Image (cartoon, coloured by chain):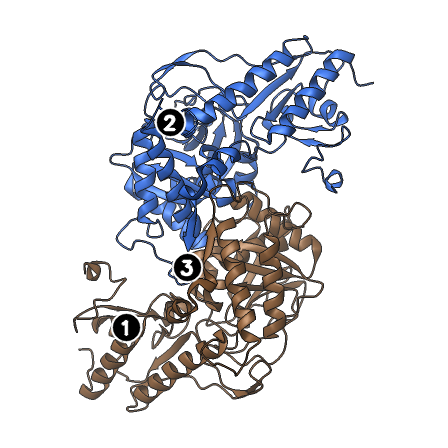
Chain colours: A brown, B blue
């Protein structure tokens, strides 16, 4: 294993290995997909999907009809979003759709760039993605809580939030504001589904729903037709559509999930969301157990809510643990963990206190277990950085 | 068939149907892929490619190793580009790679946007893609031939050129210029391969090479490591990588093409480039035959060159016909054709004389034949727009 040089994979046979919990690479659900066997296999012959077009009669002309159907069906089955009277725009992951939404919500010839804000702590990529091309259409203005400029703005609302798993609503209320709801984590394995969301623009991604991050498939549910058209135009200019292979595979995978949901309770290991929720709950219990043995670290608490999908009270098991280090001698928790060969994403990246770190809960089983072991050792030795 | 409403597909049973030759949708090679049968079929089980990462030890961390190998091998087999000492960056089509190159070649904090130019007539998307986000990094400055500003610039060189199929070299010579070579059409079925290209940044796409436009796979061969890193960063910010399914399929398809090239001459219908060149040559002969029957329209002429791949003198059979209308009463050839239910892309879109139109040579067989029929009828009746 030559991974220690770049620290992106873990040699689990060695106690000296680096554990990478920085990215939210969703490997956790792999055993489920192995178990599904041929049911999720796609077979694509060489002559298929040659054309740029998937459905010339659709507003989003590169959206595969099967994927559109599978997305609508899944939202109906899960009950996490309203799909009636919404346009679906498919994207190369939801990252592309965030950029498409910014493009669509800004006038092409405005005298000033539109302000883009999000409430701290916010997803570390929002700022990068808004700023990297120095667009004259929009401008990153940081924390939504302290934003008080006049004029047009766009608020990005992530709910459940990345990094801290909290349920959020828009914050800025004045003026001509537009809101983009990033609902990547609004699925029953991460959080109770309390009502079907019906915001103007809602973004989802298969990466966090099923764990197929390599497919780069996201989708937007968009109420307003001109906005959906402009988002489609963005994707046309940016990448001339979205991989047909990924769309066909996503359609199949989402279809299997919907099928398996209809047998809820009969076999908990076949219902993806039930399987995934058990897995997330187990990891969270284990982490809370370890963290609870000392006062060095703490975790957020999440209220129990009635989940319409599960038909019972459940609590959140977010994709990331937003850990706080309570030891006064540790100012920078990311640095402290790095010294212990645990890579996390520090609070500063989310414009939060560096005493916080974001820890992926979606990694491989053995990597997660090694993390728990090392955390326990840190706590037991009372190890403090010099 | 409800296609006449949006004009993107053709009802071939009706002589009143709209023929769409505006886009370069590469359907022409479909029979070859059907003939290849299972050899090009990919089978992707549900548990595959969950991760964002494909190869953490590679500069381009989302590039599938099989695709990297297949790309290098194909260029060696065809001889159209040098791959030794080049970095490969995969993109969601070459559109994304053009944007990645612009991002990589511009300083992040320059006082002025870098000028972007291309020689007229140029690909209609370059201007749109450079301007749509009103970037402060770069600015569209139009025709390279008349460009005389001081300071940094980027010249986009498409060779063979879209729309007119000519072989091109950089034009602007002064100052601190960078060049991006778009070699989408530098394949033996479109043009003689006269030498392996070895420019600093070379862009290719599977869409025009094999006809798999729906896969959205392009690649850049990049000499300079920091440039390749910044292009990779662009794709990370824009779409967090490129569809793994499309990459795996592209790897397989390019592999089959390379395999079949090794049997050159033994069965002309199995060698993709030989097959495709015959097809292109046939269409060009037919078009030239029809056009030659009157003086209303004319086509560019291409010199015979020695093609290193074919091992003989060949001539270009471009993906688009750049047709000129010589009738004084027809000012706008696109409009004239539209009146005859033939959709083309007019010269104005390429900053050229509206007497020109770009006609796709890559459409379906029956659509192309209908185009010839209608062209013949126009010429025979001496039809002129009132």
Relative to A129, B260 lies left or right: left
Indicate whether B176 appears above or below B213. above
Q: Residue at x 43, y 28 (%)?
A: B150
Place residue B383 in its image quadrant. Answer: top right
Which of discs 3 and 2 lies nearer the camera? The answer is 3
Q: CA distance from mark 2 to mark 1?
A: 53 Å
Crowdedness of circle 3 by 10 Å Cα count: few (<14), some, many (20+)?
some
Indicate whether B70 appears above or below B372. below
Name the spot of residue A293 as percent of width and height, x first: 29, 91
Q: Residue at x 37, y 61 (%)?
A: B51
Mark 1 = which residue? A367
Indicate whether B108 appears above or below B162. below
Same chain for mark 2 and mark 1? The answer is no
Q: CA distance from mark 1 to mark 3?
A: 24 Å
Quarter of the image with the N terminus of chain B is top right
Which badge, 3 or 2, is on the more N-terminal residue?
3
Which of discs 2 and 1 lies nearer the camera? The answer is 1
Quarter of the image with the C terminus of chain B is top right
A259, A305: nearer the viewer? A259
Disc number placed over residue B258 in the picture, else none: none
Mark 3 = which residue? B45
Q: Residue at x 72, y 24 (%)?
A: B337
Which of discs 1 and 3 lies nearer the camera? The answer is 3
Q: CA distance from mark 3 to mark 2?
A: 53 Å
Mark 2 = which residue? B175
């Amino acid at each position: 294993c030559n991974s220690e040089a770049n620290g992106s994979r873990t040699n689990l046979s060695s106690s000296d290995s680096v554990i990478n919990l920085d990215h939210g690479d969703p490997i956790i659900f792999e055993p489920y997909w192995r178990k599904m066997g041929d049911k999720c296999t796609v077979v694509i012959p060489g002559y298929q999907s040659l054309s740029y077009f998937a459905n010339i009669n659709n507003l989003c002309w590169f959206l595969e009809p099967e994927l559109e159907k599978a997305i609508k069906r899944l939202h109906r089955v899960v009950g996490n979003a309203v799909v009636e009277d919404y346009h679906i725009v498919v994207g190369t992951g939801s990252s592309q759709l965030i950029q498409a939404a910014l493009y669509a919500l800004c006038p092409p010839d405005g005298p000033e760039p539109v302000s883009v804000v999000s409430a701290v702590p916010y997803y570390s990529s929002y700022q990068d993605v808004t700023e990297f091309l120095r667009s004259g259409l929009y401008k990153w203005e940081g924390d939504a809580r302290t934003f008080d400029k006049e004029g047009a703005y766009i608020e990005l609302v992530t709910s459940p939030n990345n990094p801290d798993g909290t349920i959020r609503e828009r914050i800025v209320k004045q003026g001509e504001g537009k809101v983009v709801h990033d609902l990547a984590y609004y699925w029953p394995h991460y959080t109770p589904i309390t009502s079907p969301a019906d915001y103007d623009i809602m973004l989802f991604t298969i990466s966090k729903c099923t764990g197929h991050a390599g497919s780069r498939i996201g989708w937007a549910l968009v109420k307003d037709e001109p906005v959906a058209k402009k988002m489609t135009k963005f994707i046309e200019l940016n990448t001339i559509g979205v991989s047909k292979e990924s769309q066909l595979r996503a359609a199949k995978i989402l279809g299997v999930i919907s099928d398996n949901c209809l047998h809820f309770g009969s076999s908990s290991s076949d219902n993806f969301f039930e399987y995934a929720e058990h897995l997330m709950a187990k990891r969270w219990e284990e982490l809370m157990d370890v963290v609870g043995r000392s006062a060095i670290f703490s975790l957020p608490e999440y209220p129990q809510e009635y989940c319409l999908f599960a038909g019972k009270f459940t609590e959140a098991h977010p994709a990331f643990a937003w850990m706080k280090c309570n030891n006064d001698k540790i100012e920078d928790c990311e640095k402290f963990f790095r010294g212990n060969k645990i890579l996390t994403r520090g609070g500063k990246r989310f414009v939060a206190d560096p005493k916080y770190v974001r820890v992926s809960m979606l990694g491989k089983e053995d990597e997660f277990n090694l993390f728990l072991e090392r955390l326990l050792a840190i706590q037991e030795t009372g190890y403090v950085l010099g």
